[in-house]
Amino acid sequence: MILKYILLGFLNYGPLTGYHLKRLIDQSIANFWYAELSQIYTTLKKLEADGLITSQVEPQADRPDRRIYTITDAGREDLQKWLREPLLEASPVKEPLLVKLFFSSSLPKQNLMTQLTLQKELHQQKLTYYRTVIPTEMQGKTSMLSASPNDMLLWEATRRAGELYEEMYIRWLDEIIAQIEHQYQE
């Protein structure tokens, strides 16, 4: 259901192809919501069948024709209705590392340390990405999507949430690595 509103949200900026929608997702919100190209096209077909978007085929001389999607007034109304509805519960977290850690008491300390150290490196890379790459990408999206100052403010809020999440996760990893190093009994 969220993918529906992601697509409507991007199409609210202007007409786009499925390929461009996938690129926008990958270069922006994939840090907190991911979608496969097949899911995108399936959802676009449903949105069009529901009258929330329209599409037209644009012939291309040296490439396959491309389909360009445009949000309808009904699509804008549906998006605005959804945006206005408050979220009444916290979203559940799915974290594979926590599941593995929960059941790993039979593993040797070194195995745990290797997994946790690797995760720390990955989260440090992601933190660097939030701090360096994303601000530049956000600037590029500003002109491409005719972003308003409010868009930029809210995009920065989501980037900052990712940055703070990575800082928290690294801090937690440092704590659990130290605890396992000093307290874990083999």
Image: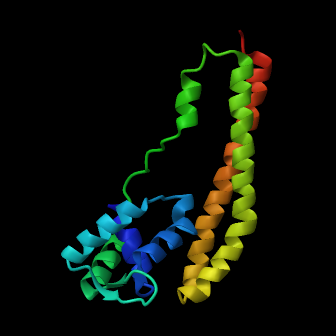
- Is residue 86 visible in the rendered image? The answer is no
Q: Is residue 84 above or below residue 97?
A: below
Q: Is residue 68 left or right of residue 25?
A: left
Residue 110 found in image quarter:
top right
Q: Is residue 57 above or below residue 46?
A: below
* Residue 154 vs residue 140, the one in the foreground: 140
- Colour convention: rainbow
- Is residue 60 visible in the rendered image? The answer is yes
Q: Is residue 51 above or below residue 127?
A: below
Residue 163 found in image quarter:
bottom right
Residue farthest along the front direction in this orientation:
62
Residue, x 59% and y 81% (percent of image)? 141
Quarter placement of the N terminus: bottom left
Residue, x 40% and y 80% (percent of image)? 64
Residue farthest along the top direction in this orientation:
186
* Residue 15 vs residue 124, the one in the foreground: 15
Q: Is residue 104 above or below residue 141?
A: above
Percent across and percent down for residue 62 are 46, 86
Q: Is residue 104 left or right of residue 121?
A: left
Q: Is residue 136 left or right of residue 26?
A: right
Residue, x 60% and y 16% (percent of image)? 105
Residue 130 found in image quarter:
bottom right
Percent across and percent down for residue 143 are 60, 89
Quarter placement of the C terminus: top right
Percent across and percent down for residue 88 are 36, 56
